[in-house]
Amino acid sequence: MKKKKTNLSGSEFIEGKKVKSVKSKMKSEKFFHYLAETFRAMSDPTRAKIIFALCQENELCVSDIASIIGTTNSAISHQLRTLRNMKLVKYNKAGKVTYYSLDDIHINNLFAEGLRHVEDK
């Protein structure tokens, strides 16, 4: 059995090399705050449905998203604003119509992994 060691802050650890390795890769508090905010933005069921719809089609307008989800344009616009502020979706305008798409492939991949995780349960 390995002997516990103590670091300068008084925390105990056993595997010194592993602790050092992970600590050297640790990101900043700001980074983890932004990561948590990204997951929080996707944690709302309506926003999850919007992301799901945008994973199926590259680009959808507000009215089409509202129709797919079964809610109002206003409600969808509010949720899209949250997703846009978190850089999860982007938009472009064609005349009076605003089209939304996922900001980049990482959002699609992240969401797809989440779907696989839930489906495998």
Image: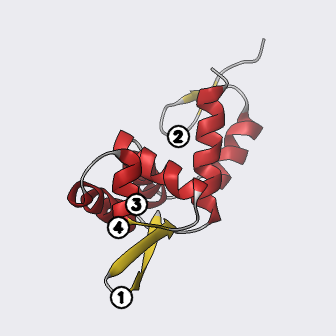
Q: Mark 4 points at which residue?
A: 85
- Classify mark 2: helix, strand or loop: loop
The amino acid beneath tag 1 is Gly
Q: How crowded is mark 4: few (under 14 residues within 10 Å), some or many (20 or more)?
A: few
* Amino acid, disc 3: Asp
Residue plotted at (63% across, 28% down): 119
Q: Which of marks 3 and 1 is nearer the N terminus?
A: 3
> In the rendering, at what x and y percent does residue 22 appear?
67, 45
Q: Residue furthest left?
A: 74
Amino acid type assigned to the residue bearing label 4 in the image: Asn
Measure the alpha-carbon separation of dots 2 and 3: 57 Å
> Residue, x 30% and y 65% (percent of image)?
81
Residue 63, quarter of picture: bottom left
- In the picture, the disc for residue 64 is 3
Seen in the picture, residue 13 relative to 69 is either above or below; the reply is above
Q: Earlier in the sequence, mark 2 or mark 1?
A: 2
Q: Do the residues labelled 4 and 2 touch (CB within 8 Å)?
A: no
Q: Mark 4 vs mark 2: give the one in front.
A: 4
Front disc: 3 or 4: 3
Label disc, if present, on residue 95 of the rendered structure: 1
Which is more foreground, mark 2 or mark 3?
3
Q: How crowded is mark 3: few (under 14 residues within 10 Å), some or many (20 or more)?
A: some
Give the alpha-carbon distance from disc 1 to disc 4, as whole Å: 22 Å
Secondary structure at numbered mark 4: helix
The image shows residue 15, relative to residue 66, as above or below, that is: above
Q: Distance between the residues labelled 2 and 1?
A: 62 Å
**Residue in the image at 41% along x and 49% along y:** 68
Q: Which mark is residue 8?
A: 2
